[in-house]
Image (cartoon, rainbow, N blue to C red):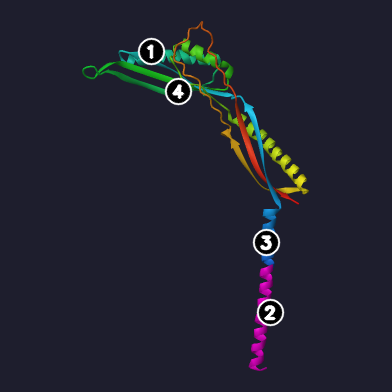
Amino acid sequence: MSLENKNDRSYLAIIALSVVLVVMSLTIYAISQTGSEKNTEDTIIMSGYAEQKVVPDTATLSIGAVIESETAEEAADENAVIMSAVMEELKAIGLEDREIQTSYVSVYPMYNYDEKRSITGYSASNSVQVTTTKLDDLSEIIDRSTAAGANQIGGISFSVSNDMQEQLREDLMAEAIADASSKANELASSLGVKITGVQTASINEGNNFRVYYDVMEEEAAIDSGAVPTPIEPGESTVSMSVQVTYYIG
């Protein structure tokens, strides 16, 4: 076989291989375009929303006493007597150890700056933080604490416990998804198509399921025969929204 014939055959083989590569490239491109068009054109995006009114089930408040005396020892001792009495009242109401936590303890000198700085006495402070789900006992907790000698009742905050948050999340998610599905089916029906599946979905949780309230600080002692301190947790709205991308066909 001549060298010229060998060159001709090699040239034809190269051309044939090039044609095959071009055809394969065009086929892959067509498939990718078909998939891309399906992802963008054969879908509809719908949002769903759900909300609920919720009454907080957990309260947190600070209870303490501030005592001033001529000596640090006297101030600390008197403060200890008062806070021991407060703790006894809290336990008598039914609060457990895990619901009461010491949050602040201090003894410091008080100064007079009229002529030159001099110590005029000492102040002893002690406070506990109470976190409880016994909301019906809040008025009694405050009144009996002040009757025992507490003179510092911090602002009360109300929140939703983790257990309630989980229950709310499950309920709201189901309602929001059902809302999105209902609207998507209505739209698909009006367009003459059907929902065939779900491509993507995302969730947006409103309020983070934590609701806080502030009550004015109570500092004045309450007589044992006074009207019970009114405490109302109120309610708030928690919400959830979802966005779902549906396949249609």
Res 102 label: 4
Contact between marks 1 and 3 (CB within 8 A): the answer is no
Range of magenta residues: 1-26
Residue on which the image places disc 3: 33
Q: Earlier in the sequence, mark 2 or mark 3?
A: 2
Q: Which mark is residue 16?
A: 2
Q: CA distance from mark 1 to mark 2?
A: 103 Å
| Principal secondary structure, stretch drawn in magenta | helix
Q: Which mark sits nearer the N-terminus, 4 or 3?
A: 3
**Residue 101 locus on image (x, y percent):** 48, 23
What crowding class fits label 4: few (fewer than 14 Cα within 10 Å), some (14-19), or many (20 or more)?
A: few
Residue lying furthest front = 190
Taking depth in this image into account, of 187 and 4 the one nearest to the observer is 187
**Residue topped by disc 1:** 78
Front position in the image: 55 or 127: 55
Kind of residue at badge 4: Thr
Per the image, label 3 sits on a secondary structure element best described as helix
Q: From the viewer's perspective, tell me whether residue 247 is left or right of residue 94.
A: right
- Residue 6 percent across, percent down from the top left: 65, 89
